[in-house]
Amino acid sequence: MPNIQYNIHDLISITIDEGVNKAIIRDIDFQIRYFKISSNGHPSPRQIRIAPFERFPAANQNSFEMFHLVEGLEGNAFRDPDGQFALQRVQGGFEIYSDQPMFLINLFIQLLLIEQGISLIHAAA
């Protein structure tokens, strides 16, 4: 299955990579289906990318610090190997690596909207 794309009023682009768990795709589509697009369109200033957990880059993991049952780098990355979830802050957005439907995409959308001076988003926007 090819990548799935969403675009929220040209403010945020969301890409679901090939190979993402179907339950995650179903959950995200339920939350933001209205914003689904058939092609890439033009890039938005903010981006969210969702990929399978196994694709989380290992580059910085040697310098990760443990905190309770998770590990990461402050302000940069977070990884929960048991929950099969990782989050990395990248230029202009987030990369989410997960094999479990345990997150709400709306939270990350709202964080990126706040950075653009928008403090509320309604489901029917």
Image (cartoon, rainbow, N blue to C red):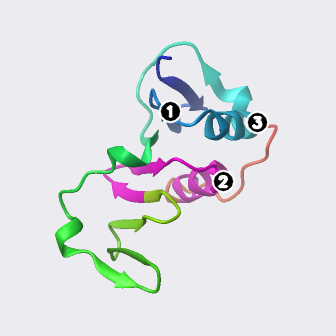
Callout 2 secondary element: loop
Identify the residue under disc 1. Answer: 16
- Which residue is most to the bottom? 68
Per the image, the residue denoted by label 3 is 30
Does 63 sit left or right of 109 as displayed?
Answer: left
Q: CA distance from mark 3 to mark 2?
A: 11 Å
Sequence-wise, the earlier of marks 2 and 1 is 1
Q: Which residue is mark 2?
A: 104
In space, the residues marked 2 and 1 are separated at their CA atoms by 14 Å
Q: Amino acid at mark 2?
A: Leu
Q: How would you rate the neighbour count of disc 1 (Cα within 10 Å): few for under 14, some for 14-19, many for 20 or more?
A: many
Residue pictured at 71% horizontal, 56% vertical: 120
Q: Earlier in the sequence, mark 3 or mark 1?
A: 1
Position of 52 relative to 73 (above/below): above
Amino acid under label 1? Ile
Could you say whether the residue bearing mark 3 is in a helix, strand or loop? helix
Q: What residue is at 33 percent from the left and 44 percent from the top?
A: 55
**Contact (CB < 8 A) between labels 3 and 2?**
no
Q: Nearer the viewer, residue 37 or 17?
A: 17
Decide which of 20, 38 is in the foreground and name it: 20
The numbered disc on residue 75 is none
Query: x%, y% of residue 23?
Result: 66, 38
Q: Measured from the top left, where is residue 84 in percent x and y? A: 48, 57
> Which image quarter holds the C terminus?
top right
Give the magenta-colored segment's residue range: 87-114
Q: Position of residue 77 (x, y in %)?
A: 35, 65
Number of numbered callouts drawn: 3
Residue at image point 48% right, 58% down: 85
Image side of residue 8 versus residue 19, left or right: right
**What is the spatial separation of the Cα atoms under label 3 and label 1, in whole angstroms?**
14 Å
